[in-house]
Image: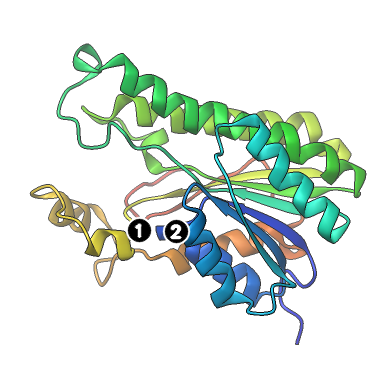
Amino acid sequence: MAGLLNDKVIIVAGLGGIGNGLAKRYADEGARLVIGDLDADLTTRVATDLDASGERVLPTALDGADEGSVASIVALAVDTFSRLDGIHVNFTSAADAYLPGGVVDMPLDVFDDVMRVNTRGFVICAKHAIPPMIDGGGGSIVFTASIDAYNGAGTRVAYQMSKAAELALMRHIARRYGPKGIRANAIAPGLIWHYKFDEMTMPDGVVDQTRARQMIKSRFGNPDDVAALGALLLSDDGSFITAQTISVDGGVTFRP
């Protein structure tokens, strides 16, 4: 039985906690994938786990904030599979995530790094992915954003600003390139528990505070929750959905 993404050519830009789940779900749905990450060893391991033949899942090193690197992953997809149907931009810098201060205390080098990756990097991915998708008759762009894009917080101001910028870029793409067959949407996760959290010590109170804010109390989100929505948005079943930000956060946010 064909999956939602049967034979679509999809780039997953950014692996790790959520990204590994995206790659697995999209491969299970029948997509042909090019996956990239700064961690080239991780990329190779994920690709081998998903497709030992190397015919349907191609790994490559990717620095999403470097234009040459992004151009290369797009070219690899098009040269290998003859087209590009979609890209899920999933990498992020959260360099200020656990800094205690606000904008007055923000080190500008940290601010610049977050904006370089989360804003400039997303622009570069859109710039290079849109033309071949238009050439192929259309396609879908999905951004992994965050509920921090519209939830105020007293810290991590650079991260919040960058995620709001991603939503502005998504809406621009949907309006400007929609008539040429390009759809663009964003997924805004809340706390998505993945293997990296098992390897770190969370700041005091974060887990309990998050559970208290969720309407779904039985569990935290996991990468499969994000991947399920991403598969829909990249698929023909989602072909009338564009310019939307959809939260995957267990009901932390209530938005029209």
Q: Is residue 126 left or right of residue 217?
A: right
Residue 240 appears in the figure: no
Disc 2 marks which amino acid?
Ile
Which residue was labeled with disc 2?
18
Residue 217: image x %, image y %? 24, 67
Q: Are marks 2 and 1 in contact (CB under 8 Å)?
A: yes
Residue found 8% across the figure and 49% down from its top = 204
Residue 192 — which label?
A: 1
Instruction: Examine the rendered structure and indicate whether residue 45 appears above or below residue 131.
Output: below
Residue 133 appears in the figure: yes
Residue found 32% across the figure and 65% down from its top = 195
Disc 1 marks which amino acid?
Ile
**Which residue in the rendered view is the most extreme toward the left?**
204
Badge 2: few (under 14), some or many (20 or more) residues near its Cα, within 10 Å? many
**Which residue in the rendered view is the most extreme toward the front?**
41
Q: Is residue 55 left or right of residue 165?
A: right
